[in-house]
Amino acid sequence: MAALAPVFLLACEPFKNSAPYVRKGRKLSGNLTLLCTVKGRSMESRGGGVSRNAKSPAPRKSNSYRSSRRSAIKKSFSQEQVSFTTPLTGEATGAIIGGGLSGLLCAAALEERGIRSTVFDTGIHGLGGRMGTREVFESQQQLVFDHAAQFFTATDERFQKLVDKWLADGLVCEWKGLIGELEAGGHFTPLPSSCIKYIGAKGMRPLADSLQKFSGLVEITRPCWISKLEPCNGMWHLSEREKPRGAFDAIVIAHNGKCANRLLSSSGLPLLYRQMKGLELSSIWALLAAFKDPLPVPRDGALGAVEGAFVKGVHSVSWMANNTSKLLPLHAGPRVPECWTFFSTAGYGKRNKVPQENIPSVTAEKVKMEMLEGVEAALGLSRGTLPQPFYTRLQLWGAALPTNTLGVHCIFDPYGRAGICGDWLLGSCMEAAALSGTSLGNHLADYFQSGGTRPEEFAVGLHETFRSVARHDIGHFPGLQSKESILTASNLAIC
């Protein structure tokens, strides 16, 4: 893969490390020993190793049966800081936890600099995160849905270079269908053609597949749920439910939400955990529905029927898109089913949030009914007249979109040799994900090349504060104008 143009080295701020102290090594498993320093004493580190810096532990108090969540959070924030002292060698390696666009491009940037990495991802069907396309066969018909990112724009020349390569390879094309705002009652207003809207020519998933054509320096492990990070003998040791998954010189967290919070809560990286924990995310329901007959959507003369619309004035629906006319325009016709993707509003998602791994059937049926009623209201149809879909699938994106951001390309703790990348650091879009992943990959490569001897020069993003994000319910679109404003980030990237 032709990597993005190198992203400029981010300005770094000093990393404030607490006073060193000493603690005897504690046994982990097998022959591994955590090598540390203890306040008031020193011990020779046989392997270079790791130190943890914090206040001396107070005598343990008896725990009540019901410990509060607040107490657990305070304990996590006060965890000891890992500080590696082992010099880095020319064979340094990185572990990237998360195989979405940001994680894959971080690996690509490291590969271009000659650095090995392993990408760990939970995906069963493939990598790509929100670049997801679902293909199913129902009633002897092929149904295709983009069920997360719907389209994207490119305003940064570094991201545009990657998009140009996708265009040359036939992986993306311009979405020329009619897109606009649909107000309750069926009142449609086309959006101005202010910028090019790109879509995956055969869905979004092939874009992620194209990024996996590495030269051999990148290993991909999936499905894999990394459940523990442990610093030992100058390396990060990763495990999945007690199963060892390798040792690495540095780690990258390329996902967010409760799984990332849980992973960082006891890792010895309190500054990274604090930044990740400060992220606030909305929830969005996605309803995939296939109809035998075309929906009665608005039309606009020679432009034809609406293919995508931001829905206004409906509490349960904020977006709707016809995947059939978008992805299979040559096959669209009166006998071809229409495959639609509907997204809820963030407010509706919040009011109806449940554990996304185990959605109660009662909730699923309620949400499906109310979202279809919302579509009916948006189109201005009489109650009960919307054609009934012959296929539906409901999905909850429990950690969908950020409501706040740090406004930095990446985060890196040079003492703990750990970083974070992801679209949420800059907004919520494919462009932001690409820039963040590439930035951290190049930043980590520069740190490796320095040998880790000047860590204070490489700290970035550890002390920035969050600010709120002015956003659309389902994403940000740099360069895309609406009736009311210019949206400021890039796609329908559902986190």
Image: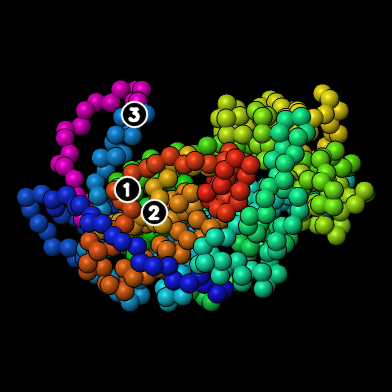
Q: Any mark on residue 70, and which?
A: 3
Q: Check disc 3 and report its element: helix, strand or loop.
A: helix
Q: Amino acid at mark 1?
A: Glu
- Give the mark toward the camera: 3 or 2: 2
Q: Which residues are magenta?
A: 50-68
What is the image's colouring? rainbow
Q: Earlier in the sequence, mark 1 or mark 3?
A: 3
Q: Choose between 41 and 139: the one closer to the eye.
A: 139
Give the labeled residue for mark 2. 408
| The N terminus sits in image quarter | bottom right
CB under 8 Å between callouts 1 and 2?
Answer: yes
Label 1 – label 3 distance at C-alpha: 23 Å
Q: Quadrant of residue 252?
A: bottom left
- Give the mark toward the camera: 1 or 3: 1
Across and down, in percent, residue 132 comes to 65, 53
Q: Amino acid at mark 3?
A: Arg
Q: Check disc 1 and report its element: helix, strand or loop.
A: loop
Q: Quadrant of residue 184?
A: top right
Give the labeled residue for mark 1. 464
Q: Check disc 2 and report its element: helix, strand or loop.
A: loop
- Who's the residue at 61% across and 70% down the image? 164
Vertically, is 434 above or below 491?
below
Across and down, in percent, residue 75 comes to 28, 36
